[in-house]
Image: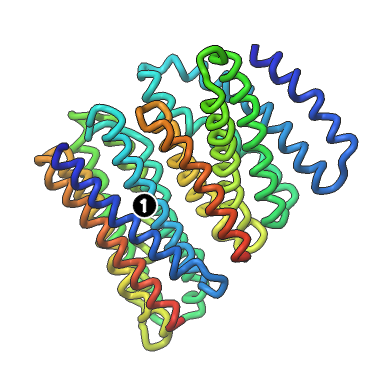
């Protein structure tokens, strides 16, 4: 089922690659990569699902590690090969994360559509979308030192990867609990806060 | 509410204050890289505190269970290492004579910390082996971090004013590592109040680091 969903969504979106140019093309390629990464993550999670842990434990602790590492790989390859500017890396990270969130949300809605209210779908769409976009952007920020301060590249990437994994884990724990609304609101509030801070300050 | 959970809540509250303080005072264009990296480490510590609290809140309280908070604390120590290695060591590397002695002492201190990590392994191996291994892996960044903290503490300060400014941060960083190692050992051996107090002490030390980092900017 996942592969059919991937085809149905990625094929129309792939037309952007042929029409857009420059930055828009690059970001649409990253969006498509994000869609593919979800597909790969679903198989990795399926394989690791045989570990002797409860589903809740897996979703809260192991799932975030798997997903954040897989999402970071395309950005890491881009950072090594092209050594891009920070803004380009952040846009790429956001695009991969959003692509990931698209497939994840669609799969979730197909499975639970009859049980989910419109409000829940809204929160799920915004919350999961901003979470994945934000966490990959955070990791991309850590990788942005590859051009400016090479000594910080490795530790920066790992530090921000750990931040992204922890944030993702907090979200997953909360949305499985009775504090679901707080879970959905956290990435939305964080995203808006970071956007305001980024507009106010420019980072070198 | 268990005593341990109350201690986690207090530590989390202190961590939130420390992070907000660091964002207000350190998140500026003119802030040196060293202080910005300190801010990242405080952010990582805050996430560690939040993950610990939420884990206790959402799931049945299992103090000995592994969870993602290990990754957060790994990030915190890694950031403290990178502050000294990436942010500070290139300034210091132009430096003074007599660099060998601080490096040798730093290596000896590293050896002491390695023995502490080995102690963590022996304390945990018969209780919950995996959790012990997770503690050790997440504490590995302490080793390079403490090396640079000790080295920068011992380098002659009259030749590099900046080393004098950061003395307090280096001392508090070392105390932070010790408090976390103490936490890992007491979690198995003692009543949960002692590891809970370690959480609070760690949060207070992080608050101290942030305050000193802010003071350091104006003297940079």
Residue A145: x and y in percent read: 61, 58
What secondary structure is marked by label 1? helix
Residue B207: x and y in percent read: 31, 63
- Residue visible at 13% across and 47% down in the picture: B194
**What residue occupies the far front of the structure in this picture?**
A118
Q: Vertically, is A161 above or below B214?
A: above
Total residue callouts: 1
- Residue visible at 51% across and 30% down in the picture: A66
Q: Vertically, is A173 above or below B16?
A: above
Give the side of residue B91 with respect to residue A53, left or right: right
Q: Vertically, is B124 above or below B170?
A: above
Residue B47: x and y in percent read: 39, 47
Q: Relative to the observer, which residue lies in front, B204 or A150?
A: B204
Badge 1 density bin: few <14, some 14–19, many ≥20, Cα 10 Å: many
Q: Chain of mark 1?
A: B
Q: Which residue is mark 1?
A: B45
- Residue visible at 69% across and 44% down in the picture: A92
Give the side of residue B220 with respect to residue B118, left or right: right
């Amino acid at each position: 089922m996942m592969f059919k969903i991937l085809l149905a969504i990625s094929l129309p979106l792939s037309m952007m690659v042929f029409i857009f140019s420059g930055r828009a093309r690059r970001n649409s390629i990253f969006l498509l990569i994000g869609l593919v990464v979800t597909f790969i993550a679903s198989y990795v999670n399926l394989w690791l699902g045989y570990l002797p842990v409860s589903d809740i434990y897996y979703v809260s602790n192991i799932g975030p590690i798997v997903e954040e590492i897989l999402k970071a790989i395309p950005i890491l390859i881009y950072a090594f090969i092209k050594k891009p500017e920070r803004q380009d890396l952040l846009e790429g990270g956001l695009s991969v994360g959003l692509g990931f969130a698209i497939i994840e949300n669609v799969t979730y809605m197909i499975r639970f559509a009859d049980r989910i209210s419109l409000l829940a779908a809204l929160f799920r769409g915004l919350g999961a979308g901003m979470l994945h976009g934000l966490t990959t952007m955070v990791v991309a920020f850590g990788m942005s030192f590859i051009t400016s301060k090479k000594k910080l590249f490795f530790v920066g990437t790992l530090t921000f990867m750990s931040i992204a994994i922890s944030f993702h884990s907090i979200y997953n724990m909360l949305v499985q609990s009775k504090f679901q609304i707080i879970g959905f609101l956290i990435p939305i509030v964080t995203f808006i806060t970071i956007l305001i801070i980024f507009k106010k300050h420019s980072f070198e | 509410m268990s005593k341990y959970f109350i201690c986690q809540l207090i530590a989390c509250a202190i961590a939130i204050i420390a992070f907000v303080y660091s964002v207000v005072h350190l998140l500026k264009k003119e802030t040196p890289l060293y202080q910005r990296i300190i801010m990242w480490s405080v952010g990582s510590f805050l996430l560690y505190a939040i993950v610990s609290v939420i884990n206790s809140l959402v799931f049945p309280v299992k103090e000995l269970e592994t969870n993602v908070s290990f990754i957060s604390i790994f990030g915190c120590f890694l950031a403290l290492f990178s502050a000294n290695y990436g942010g500070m060591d290139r300034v210091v590397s132009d430096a003074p004579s007599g660099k060998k002695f601080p490096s040798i002492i730093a290596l000896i201190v590293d050896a002491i910390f390695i023995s502490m990590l080995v102690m963590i392994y022996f304390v945990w191996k018969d209780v919950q082996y995996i959790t012990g291994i997770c503690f050790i892996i997440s504490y590995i960044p302490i080793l390079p971090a403490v090396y640079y903290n000790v080295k920068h503490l011992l380098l002659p300060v009259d030749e590099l004013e900046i080393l004098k400014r950061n003395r307090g941060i280096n001392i508090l960083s070392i105390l932070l590592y010790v408090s976390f190692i103490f936490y890992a050992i007491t979690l198995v051996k003692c009543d949960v109040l002692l590891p809970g107090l370690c959480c609070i002490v760690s949060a207070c030390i992080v608050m101290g680091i942030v305050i000193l980092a802010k003071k350091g900017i104006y003297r940079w």
